[in-house]
Amino acid sequence: MTMPPIFKKIVALFFLLAAAVPAARAQMQVDITLKRTLYLTYEPLIVNVTIQNLTGNSLNLRDTEGIPWFGFQIETLDGRPIAAHGSQHTNEPLLLKAGEKLTRAVNLTPLYPISEFGGYRIRASIHAQSLGRTFSSQPLNVEITEGRPLFEKTVGVPADQPGGGETRKITLLSHRLPNSTQLYLRIVNPDRGVVHCTHRLGRLVSYGSPEIRLDSANQIHVLQNVAPKSFLYSHIGLNGEVLQRKTYQQNIKRPALKHGADGLITVIGAQEYDPASEAEKQATTPSITDRPVPLPDSDTDLSPSDERRPKNLLSR
């Protein structure tokens, strides 16, 4: 049967449009990645967003008519949308050259109310005004849960410290991740409902309980066992500031925190060492019995690679 000319034109137009759709979608590629899918409530939730300009021309990305060129679409797993804190977020203009790829790391915790327990679906979106289109990433799911409290105490802030006269609730929690158990410290102002920090202090081995003490200024001192005979000491201020992070090697007995006559707290029964210098020494004289344990900061983390935080944090 011979197809009428009008039908031939319709079929040809259909295939032309079908071929054009993938090309249009490929004009801007947006991808997101997460280090983990399980997070503690109020913990920094870092999303790495990668965008690539595949239009063949430079793109001038800028906020227009109240539409931000860079943003997120977040909803609960049952489809309830989650609006950002505040009425509007703005972004600095960006010139993205043809073929250029850009990656940003964004902390979603201060931007969106995602502290309720449960699952969330996250997309990143890029609005290109010159193309008249918005490009979105594939969605990723995360789950927000809570850890197991190991220590809780409410204390006052000394008058000579920032926030003097206020109160702080200090909570030490353990949280089981797929590959390890992590220790967290949360500091909250219970009167104002302000969360000053939810710090992930590092790995916690199953055969050792962490020790926590408060000094005369109510600052927090934590000593945790992170590996056989290796301990991590953290000194945290009442507003969440990290004052000290040190690594210790056990001498004979298990080390401990001790109050001094001057009101300060020190680590006894262990010797401090520098993981970087120990790693260099191990590289020349390898040993399997006395491995250095690096500090879990942005450069070296005791956590498995899929649990590490990125270095280029761009929280808004």
Image (tube, rainbow, N blue to C red):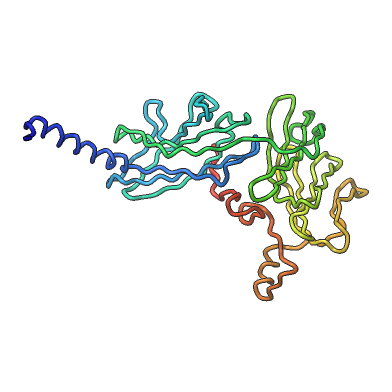
Q: What residue do we see at 31% from left, 40% from top?
A: 25
Residue nearest the observer in this picture, 19 or 2? 2
Q: Which percent across, then down, holds residue 103?
A: 45, 47
Count of number-bearing discs: 0
Q: What residue do we see at 72% from left, 37% from top?
A: 186
The quadrant where residue 135 appears? top left
Q: Quadrant of the N terminus?
A: top left
From what the image shows, is residue 100 above or below residue 79?
Answer: below
Q: Which percent across, then down, holds residue 209?
A: 81, 48
From what the image shows, is residue 172 above or below residue 301?
Answer: above
Q: Quadrant of the C terminus?
A: top right
Q: Does residue 181 appear to the left or right of 112 in the view shown?
A: right
From what the image shows, is residue 263 above or below residue 281?
Answer: above
Q: Which percent across, then down, holds residue 287?
A: 71, 72
Residue nearest the observer in this picture, 165 or 48? 48
Q: What residue do we see at 58% from left, 40% from top?
A: 45
Q: Does residue 313 appear to the left or right of 5 in the view shown?
A: right
- Residue at the farthest right position: 261
Q: Which percent across, then down, holds residue 29?
A: 37, 44
Q: Does residue 301 appear to the left or right of 34 in the view shown?
A: right
